[in-house]
């Protein structure tokens, strides 16, 4: 009898090409967000190199890559900004558009969108009650 090894599942992070692909996605993402007049104001006093690095680390974790994120948690970082649901959804739309533009597989995009839905109440002003 032969024993066949189950192949190790490949993470979404590996499927899309690893760190280089995540970095490219984050660069395009912030190019879009900073060009959006409704969202650009959130970043006027932000160190964008650091912001891009943090976002790449967070997206890496979401995609199943190595966890090297050492920044503040989502609620601590975002609650002072009083982000309305509409702006949160715009940001998610920009991320989805970039992932689509980069030909990221649909199941990966769906999983990223699911994470965005799960963490929304940590980012928006007043949490989920703003959805009503």
Image (cartoon, rainbow, N blue to C red):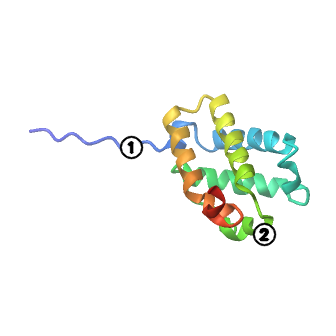
Please tell me in which quadrant of the rendered image residue 131 appears.
bottom right
Q: Residue at x 8, y 39 (%)?
A: 1
Q: Residue at x 54, y 56 (%)?
A: 118
Please tell me in which quadrant of the rendered image residue 75 appears.
bottom right
Left or right: residue 23 compared with residue 66 = right
Q: How many C-alpha atoms fall within 10 Å of the one at disc 1: few (<14), some, or many (≥20)?
A: few
Left or right: residue 34 compared with residue 6 = right
Distance between the Cα atoms at labels 1 and 2? 39 Å
User: Where's residue 28, x and y in %?
Assistant: 76, 38
Q: Residue furthest right?
A: 44
Q: Mark 1 or mark 2: which comes first in sequence?
A: 1
Against 69, residue 117 (above or below) is: above
User: Where's residue 115, x and y in %?
Assistant: 55, 52
Which is closer to the viewer, label 1 or label 2? Answer: 2
User: Where's residue 62, x and y in %?
Assistant: 56, 52
Circle on res. 29: none
Residue beneath label 1, please? 9
Q: Residue at x 71, y 40 (%)?
A: 94
- Which structural element holds mark 1? loop
Q: How many C-alpha atoms fall within 10 Å of the one at disc 2: few (<14), some, or many (≥20)?
A: few
Residue beneath label 2, please? 80
Q: Residue at x 64, y 65 (%)?
A: 127
User: Where's residue 67, x and y in %?
Assistant: 57, 59
């Amino acid at each position: 009898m032969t024993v066949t090894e189950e192949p190790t599942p490949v993470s979404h992070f590996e499927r899309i090409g690893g760190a280089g692909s995540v970095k490219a996605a984050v660069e395009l993402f912030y190019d879009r967000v900073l060009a959006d007049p409704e969202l650009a104001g959130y970043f006027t006093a932000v160190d964008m190199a650091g912001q891009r690095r943090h976002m790449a680390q967070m997206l890496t974790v979401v995609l199943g890559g190595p966890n090297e994120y050492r920044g503040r948690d989502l609620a601590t970082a975002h609650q002072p900004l009083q982000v309305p649901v509409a702006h949160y959804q715009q940001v998610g739309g920009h991320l989805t558009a970039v992932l689509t533009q980069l030909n990221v597989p649909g199941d990966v995009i769906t999983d990223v969108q699911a994470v965005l839905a799960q963490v929304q109440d940590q980012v928006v002003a007043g949490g989920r009650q703003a959805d009503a």
